[in-house]
Amino acid sequence: MNTEFNSTDMGNIRIANEVIEIIAGLAATEVVGVAGMSGGVAGGIAELLGRKNLSKGVKVEVGQKQCAVDVSIVAEYGVRIPEVAGEIQDNVKRAIESMTGLEVVEVNVHVLGVVFSKPAAEEPAKEEEKPQLPPNRVL
């Protein structure tokens, strides 16, 4: 659905809801502590088919001059979730308002999971370096 929110003497300006969802999704993933977006079953199926869904985990309601955003994220383990959520709200609001001119009346953040980072022991071990002969030595 396209939303017409600005008319000029040259014509109308329309911004699709999907564009606002993509802006919000990218702004949310820029915040430190966000491991990813959570889009539910449909988003997971799209990713399995090889399509990257930039609006995954984002739902917007757009009016003539205002919009409301719902963002579903997965947080990294160890971060302060209320602080991360506050940063997401600020970043999403700033991005949408500066890029579209719409007033963002609310940004609801839903934390649907926590991701644990892999411990160092589980990371692939580096190949052992082979001792090298001095450069002047010939075999």
Image (cartoon, rainbow, N blue to C red):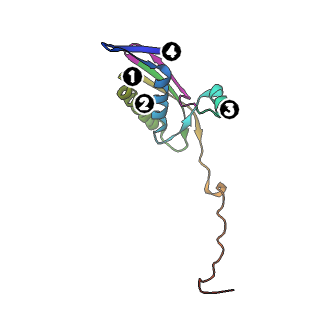
Identify the secondary structure beneath mark 4.
loop
Label 2 with label 4: CB-CB less than 8 Å = no
Percent x, y of residue 58? 52, 26
- Residue pointed to by mark 4: 1
User: Upstream in the sequence, badge 1 or badge 2?
Assistant: 2
Q: CB of mark 1 within 8 Å of CB of mark 2?
A: yes
Find numbered disc 3 in the image and state the secondary structure of the residue it sits on: loop
Q: Amino acid at mark 1?
A: Val
Which quadrant of the figure has residue 53?
A: top right
The residue that mark 3 highlights is 49
- Spatial CA distance of label 3 from label 2 is 28 Å
Residue found 39% across the figure and 30% down from its top? 95
Q: Residue 104: give its label.
A: 1
Residue 36, percent from left and from top: 55, 37
Quadrant of the image for the C terminus? bottom right
Q: Position of residue 130 (x, y in %)?
A: 66, 74
- Label 2 residue SS: helix
